[in-house]
Image (tube, rainbow, N blue to C red):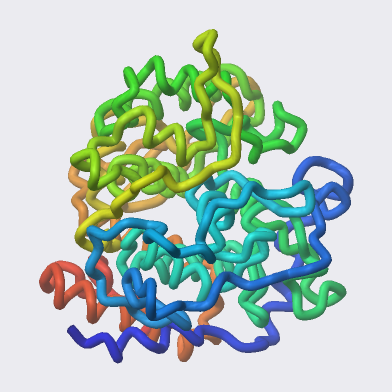
Amino acid sequence: MKVAQLLPFVGAVAALPWMAENAKRQQSGGVQPGGPITCPFNPVHKPAAAWNPAFPYNHAMLGLPGKGKGGYQVPAEGDYDHRFIAPTDKDIRGPCPGLNALANHGFIARDGITNYNELLDALQNVYNVGYDLANFLAFYAIYVAGLGDPVTKKLSIGCDATTRTSWSPLITGSEPGLDGHSKMEIDASLTRNDFFPAGGDNFSFNTTLWEMFVESTGGIFNVSTISKYRYERWHQCKDENPQFYFPILGFFQYGAASFLYELWPNGNEGYVPNLHNTATFFGAHKLSDGSWARVPERIPANWVNRKVPYFLPDIAAEIFKMYSLNPVGFGGNAGGEFVGINEPPFINDGALNANTTNADVSCLLYQILSRPIPSTLNGIVTPLVESVEALLIELFGEQFNNLGCPLALTK
């Protein structure tokens, strides 16, 4: 495998003039949930625990590719640095339970202010996410969606912590973190409220939604049951949220939902996406009366991760499969009606083209990644795309030339 070809992805972007213009990407939320005034502040930032050869996991360190061989226990017996510690009221947590669990175990900074390399290392070492997909997720969040800082490469996994992530808050403006609405988080979440009806709280775990999720799936979280619940949530939000908006970023929700049965199942339990294991990652604890309470997210005890890496084409295939089982529209509510959007050639009037393939979904993800970036950055972006492309072709064949697109977008 030509791992060396992937290394340009690691040191992606330095200070660039267009970033200042892009700084107005989202206004600060102020005193509302997720805004800088209500955002927890820990004066003592400690990075993730350093890689320890006694507990090598996937051997991923410093943002470099790991070995891609899973099937081991996380945290390992005796790994004190990665023991579970509940977050304090000074620590940031956000809408992604998988990242919250990583922070609660110190695989990323426990205060919730992480960075590009931490994300790459943690995603590989804990969940055995492929290096291509780990890069895609980190690159999109920090550089494309503007949720983090392109110079410091820091990212809040929750609320607006611009004073701690930005290289110059006066120049960059707000860096809203993963709570930022319609950036990576969008409406119709599995267990989080829609942004507007909840007064801006799109990140807190909602036990009522969790109970609906459990009832809908019967406590088995596979592609078919989750697809069904995603469909139910989409209709619920469309009917109840006058500002409901479901853009093509909705594909990210299907991808994230696949983590429940692709990344979270325990090898010691036959990799079955069962209720106990999934509830532990979500931070849901069942009480004696049958109701559910929120607790901090954590990695289940005696948890063994997936054996093989979860690559970008893998998630593209799961997105396509989950969506196709119960398709919904892309668009939003306007004037009391749902209005579909167009994203030719894949989406027309809010509907996915019936002839769409896995490679088409990969191409669509590629376009989401590249289209907000100015052509003046082609000298930086093109090597990054080519690095991922080289790996995908080697692993999955020539159909992933140009990441599945008929033509390259950045050459």
Q: Residue furthest front?
A: 78
On the rendered image, what quadrant is the C terminus found in? bottom left
Q: Nearer the viewer, residue 335 or 230?
A: 230
Relative to 49, is 102 above or below? Answer: above
Residue pictured at 49% horizontal, 18% vertical:
211
Residue pictured at 41% horizontal, 47% vertical:
256
Residue pictured at 43% horizontal, 62% vertical:
78
Res 189 seen here: yes
The picture quadrant where one finds residue 207 is top right
Q: Residue furthest left?
A: 397
Res 184 seen here: no
Residue 271 appears at what percent x and percent y? 22, 42
Determine whether, in the image, residue 103 is placed left or right of residue 59: right
Q: How many marks?
A: 0
Residue 31 appears at what percent x and percent y? 88, 45
Relative to 152, is 345 above or below? Answer: above
On the rendered image, what quadrant is the N terminus found in? bottom left
Q: Nearer the viewer, residue 152 or 269?
A: 269
Q: Residue furthest top?
A: 289
Residue 183 appears at what percent x and percent y? 59, 53
Determine whether, in the image, residue 47 is placed left or right of residue 318: right
Residue pictured at 35% horizontal, 36% vertical:
351
The picture quadrant where one finds residue 215 is top left
Residue 56 appears at what percent x and percent y? 35, 74
